[in-house]
Image (cartoon, grey):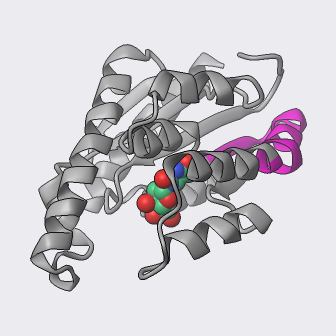
Amino acid sequence: MSGRSGGCLIVFEGIDGSGKSTQMRRAAAALRSAGWPVVELVEPTHGEYGCQIRALTRPGAQRASPEEELDLFVLDRQENVAQNIRPALKRGDVVLLDRYYFSTMAYQGARGLDPEAIRARNEAFAPRPDGVLYFDLPVEVALERIERRRLAPADLFERRDYLERVKAIYDDLAQRLDYFFTIDAARDEESVAHDVMAAIGQILRRI
Ligand code: TMP
């Protein structure tokens, strides 16, 4: 575990609409009521770079190049690691993180950048998590859940195609990395929450 001791870092990953943020809030509440010191964090953050990222991804905004996007996500993450993640781990907290560098591998990878090069650049400064919960959901279901009704057919095709490529990178990571836990996110919220707590239990027992 790259140069740190104490604490536990658990990451929630998945395509948009996979329900990971709702599940993270539930898990945080459950862990707190069981007495664990929990810190909830999200990327992109609400800091300077996170706000720049949100401005770029707002509907109608001119899309940045993949390289520019990558640089901004890395700057945002460097700040998050230094100001929030490492101090919390040092205190011995359980850190629940909504998206991390696997999102960059998947989303910027799906825009043509090399996922493994993205991973190497991130792991040079970002601690490796103890576990990643991957919320696995078919793209079609995710689109139903989020914005199908709001998208014109051409945009829908583009969005579907992009999310399929994002999902393919996540699926590949889930197969290769032994700290990934795949959660079937197509089920009802209670069943998913049950699997989330089972996976977190395993991760906490391992550290
Ligand atoms: P959210 O929907 O979880 O708030 O995430 C915001 C969007 O940012 C989402 O579409 C995924 C994208 N994203 C990237 O493209 N690269 C990254 O490194 C991260 C953290 C998010």
- Residue 134 picture location, percent across and down: 38, 39
- Residue 111 picture location, percent across and down: 39, 45
Side of 131 where 75 appears, left or right? right
Residue at screen point 62% across, 21% down: 120
Residue interval drawn in magenta: 79-96
Residue at screen point 62% across, 47% down: 96
Side of 106 where 98 appears, left or right? right
Q: Nearer the viewer, residue 115 or 131?
A: 115
Q: How many marks?
A: 0
**Residue 16 shows up from this direction:** yes
Residue at screen point 77% across, 49% down: 80
Side of 203 where 86 appears, left or right? right
Rendered-image quadrant of the N terminus:
top right
Side of 112 where 190 appears, left or right? left
Q: Nearer the viewer, residue 198 or 149?
A: 149
Up-down relation of residue 136 to residue 22 (above or below):
above
Dominant SS of magenta comes to: helix
Check if residue 94 falls in the magenta segment.
yes
Check if residue 100 falls in the magenta segment.
no
**Quadrant assignment, res 11:** top right
**Quadrant assignment, res 131:** top right
- Residue 9 picture location, percent across and down: 66, 35
Up-down relation of residue 201 to residue 76 (above or below):
above
Up-down relation of residue 198 to residue 124 (above or below):
below
Q: Nearer the viewer, residue 204 or 182?
A: 182
**Residue 98 shows up from this direction:** no
Rendered-image quadrant of the C terminus:
top right
- Residue 92 picture location, percent across and down: 83, 35
